[in-house]
Image (cartoon, rainbow, N blue to C red):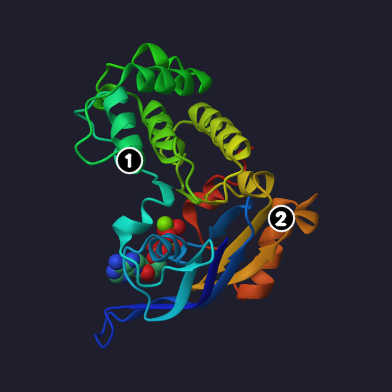
Amino acid sequence: MLKIESAVKTFFKGTPQEHTALRGLSLHLKPGEFVTVVGSNGAGKSTLFNAICGSFYLDAGAVMLDGKDITYQPDFRRAKMIGRVFQDPMMGTAPHLTIEENLALAYSRKHKLPLAPAITAKETDFFREHLAAMGMGLEDRMKTKVGLLSGGQRQVVTLLMCTLSTPKLLLLDEHTAALDPQTSEKIMEITNRIVAENHLTTMMITHNLNAALRTGTRTIMMDSGQIILDIGEEERRGMTLDDLLRMYSQKAGGEFDNDRMLLNKDNP
Ligand SMILES: Nc1ncnc2c1ncn2[C@@H]1O[C@H](COP(=O)(O)OP(=O)(O)OP(=O)(O)O)[C@@H](O)[C@H]1O
Ligand SMILES: [Mg+2]
């Protein structure tokens, strides 16, 4: 499904700030795999997502999605196939548009001509049904401007915008990090349901190591632009957070260094 081959990305090449954020990273994902991604601050996790989405082109290596080489495909083309949710609830939606308009915009990008007529009654029903399934009462607020919603509610709208037309790949970059623990738990529940129902191939960066081990089918740990641990379903079963941290220090030769992850060490 997703194949990344020996990806290399160096920022500020040839200057004193030169920094190689991806160092020959390779990763293969099978269809329907749900991979959680953890790693120290600056390990290159978000950069990996940026490389997959085409925010920049790689200096070397290749990205293939669903059998197609997209290494040099521009980001707006890839956006039709890849859904992405960011940490910041402000990022995925247009605040001055209503919930319904946001959903319609995302949906029409894939299903309609650019100048298609306004939202049809059939679409309204379709959106309402999906919103109701989220269990947050948003189906009764479809005419509310998204800027008035809470962070958690906005993340739900963003998640729906990304998944109403099934993407080939869903990328979640700490999408619950800005939410309170209870809302975060709820959004994870919704995420798991959407991923399972649509059999989505998914990657989720999380600062919650416990959640990383519990969620999805596989966990990868990044350090200095490389994948240093790749833990499959079998091996992951029964693994504790301390096991994971121990494996990290053996591989990386140092203590795990991610302020948010360690702060969240005791969260369930
Ligand atoms: N567009 C950019 N220009 C210059 N440097 C960048 C750029 N994007 C990322 N970097 C650098 O690449 C490294 C990896 O950054 P990245 O954001 O991928 O880390 P991360 O693993 O997501 O960390 P965090 O857990 O803090 O979010 C960092 O040193 C960062 O400063
Ligand atoms: Mg990041």
Is the residue indicated by label 1 positioned so its CB lies within 8 Å of ligand 2? no
Question: Which residue is the site of mark 2?
Answer: 242
Front-most of 211 and 139? Answer: 139
Please tell me the numbered disc located at residue 92: 1
Q: Residue at 61%, 74% (x, y): give it.
A: 252
Q: Quadrant location of ligand 2? A: bottom left
User: Hey, which quadrant is residue 125 in on the image?
Assistant: top left
Q: Quadrant location of the C terminus?
A: top right
SS for callout 2: helix
Measure the alpha-carbon separation of dots 1 and 2: 34 Å
- Counting from the top left corner in percent of width and height, residue 246 is at 70, 64
Image coordinates for residue 130, horizontal then vertical, percent? 47, 23
SS category of the residue bearing label 1: loop
First-in-chain label (1 vs 2):
1
Above or below for 193 versus 26: above
> In the figure, is residue 49 to the left or right of 207?
left
Along the line of sight, the residue nearer the viewer: 119 or 243: 119
Check disc 2: other Cα within 10 Å, few if <14, some if 14-19, many if 20+: few
Residue 255 appears in the picture as rendered: no
Q: In which quarter of the image is the N terminus?
A: bottom right
Amino acid of disc 2: Asp
- Seen from the viewer's position, the closer of residues 237 and 125 is 125
| Left or right of residue 127, residue 211 in this image | right
> Residue at 45% across / 66% down in the picture?
44
Residue 120, percent from left and from top: 30, 21
The residue mark sitting in front, 1 or 2, is 1
Is residue 113 shown above or below 5? Answer: above
